[in-house]
Amino acid sequence: MDDRSEQIPTREAGFIGTRPVEGPIEGLPGWYFVLVGLLVASNDLSRQFSDRYGWVALLPLVLVAVHLTLWFTLLSRRRRYLRSVWRSKQALALVAVLFTVRLLLQFGLAKLTDEAAPLHSYTHLVIGLVMLVVTTAGAWFDQWLVLRVVNRDVDRRR
């Protein structure tokens, strides 16, 4: 009898179910997390450059459209795992960290810009780039933690 037909209990998205043992679960591609980081940073980046380039004001809408298109096409098979990752406790902690980083950056840069006037013109660019890096790294790390636990359980049950 093949071990792979065995059912193992899993806890995903708030319910307990079973899934066939098919080997390790593959994570989302790295470019997806860069897209999520760009989506978070797009508001600040568009504010920074929209006065010079009018089309940049549409950047958040374009990124939302790209994100939704990918959600319903390329990522449709992994949607269940994606929901599990984003509903985890680590993801909630990531949202709290991102909110705190954003507030601290905004207040910190406001204090700095009072002392150094040229820095004031780059406030949204700095916030956008920091949020891009923190969001991308945090979301990837969150997925890595979740997959490490799930795949370790799969390997143990083999």
Image (cartoon, grey):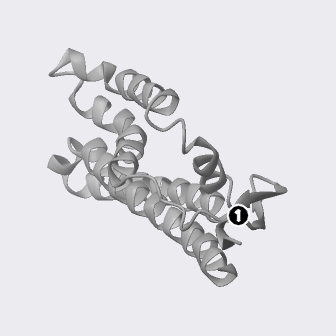
Q: Quadrant of residue 63?
A: top left
User: Which residue extends farthest right?
Assistant: 16
- In this picture, is 42 found above or below 68? below
| Residue in view at x 65 percent, y 67 percent | 4
Residue nearest the viewer, comparing 7 with 83: 7
In the image, taking residue 73 as reference, residue 152 lies left or right, namely right
Q: Amino acid at mark 1?
A: Ser
Which quarter of the figure is the N terminus placed in? Answer: bottom right
Q: Give coordinates of residue 86: x percent, y percent.
A: 61, 52
In the image, taking residue 121 as reference, residue 67 lies left or right, namely right
| Residue in view at x 39 percent, y 62 percent | 137
Residue nearest the viewer, comparing 25 with 120: 25
Q: Give coordinates of residue 46: x percent, y percent.
A: 30, 29
Q: Give coordinates of residue 62: x percent, y percent.
A: 35, 22
| Residue in view at x 36 percent, y 42 percent | 35
In the image, taking residue 62 as reference, residue 146 lies left or right, namely right
- In this picture, is 158 found above or below 99? below
Classify mark 1: helix, strand or loop: helix
Q: Look at mark 1 in the image and give the residue it sits on.
A: 5
Q: Give coordinates of residue 80: x percent, y percent.
A: 64, 45
User: Which residue extends farthest front?
Assistant: 1
Residue nearest the viewer, comparing 125 with 157: 157
- In this picture, is 121 found above or below 24? above
Q: Count neighbours of disc 1 (C-alpha within 10 A) and say few if under 14, some if 14 to 19, many if 20 or more.
A: few
Which quarter of the figure is the C terminus placed in? Answer: bottom right
Residue nearest the viewer, comparing 99 with 147: 147
In the image, taking residue 81 as reference, residue 107 lies left or right, namely left
